[in-house]
Image: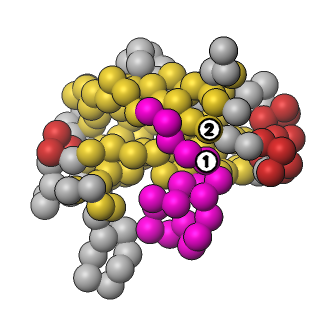
Amino acid sequence: MNYLINYEKSSAACSIIWESEDHKISELDPYIYAIQCDDGENIHELLSSDWPHAEGQNDFETIELGHFEAIEGDMPSEYLLCFYVEVEIDLDSHPLFKEALENSDNMVIARVQFKNNGSPIIDSDGNEEYLYEMSDDNFVELEDNDF
C-alpha cells in the first residue's frame, strides 16, 4: 500500500544541525533511510535497503521524495528539512510496526540521510559518515495514499 509522509510546511519539519565540514547540504541528495514510530514504550522502525547499515532489510520502497528543501533555521548551521515522501509499505509484513502505528494514531518520523553521486556517504572503514546532529523531531501522520 502507498502512504504519504508530509513535511512540506516548515512548522512540521524536523531540524538538524549540520556538522560536516567536507560536504555542503545543498550539494547532496536526500533519501529516507528509516521510518520510525513511537508506541509510547518503544521506537519501532522500518529500514530502507539504501541505508548502509540495513544489513539486507528492505522494509519499504520510496516511490517519490519531492519538494526537498533545507531551510536555514534560527541557530548557526541549523536546517529545517521540508519535503514530502510517498512510500510503499506492506504493513501486514511488519505486525509490530503496524501495532505501534495503531497505538500512536499513525504518527511517524521519516529519517533523512544524504547521498553523494548516488551513493550513501561512508568513510574508509565502511561506516556511514557523520554529517549532522538531530535538533528537533516532529512526528507527522502516515497518510493512506492509495487512490
Q: Which disc, if any, is residue 88?
A: 2
Pointers 1 and 2 in contact (CB under 8 A)? yes
Q: Is residue 99 left or right of residue 26?
A: right
At 37% from the left and 68% from the top, the residue drawn is 128
Quarter residue 141 falls in? top right
Picture quarter with the N terminus: top right
Q: Which amino acid type corresponds to the residue marked 2 in the rendered image? A: Glu
Q: Which amino acid type corresponds to the residue marked 1 in the rendered image? A: Phe
Q: Is residue 83 left or right of residue 79?
A: right
Q: Is residue 49 above or below residue 9?
A: below
Local crowd at mark 2 within 10 Å, few (<14), some, or many (≥20)? some
Q: Is residue 118 left or right of residue 147?
A: left
- Residue 125: x and y in percent read 32, 84
At 28% from the left and 27% from the top, the residue drawn is 69
Residue 59 among those drawn in magenta: yes
Nearest to the observer: residue 55 or residue 39: 55
Residue 126 visible in the shown view: yes
Pick whichever of labels 1 and 2 is earlier in the sequence.
1
At 33% from the left and 23% from the top, the residue drawn is 67
Nearest to the observer: residue 77 or residue 142: 142
Quarter residue 118 falls in? bottom left
Residue 29 among those drawn in magenta: no
Magenta stretch in the rendered image: 47-64
Quarter residue 3 falls in? top right
- Residue 71: x and y in percent read 25, 26
Give the labeled residue for mark 1: 60
Q: Is residue 13 above or below residue 33?
A: above
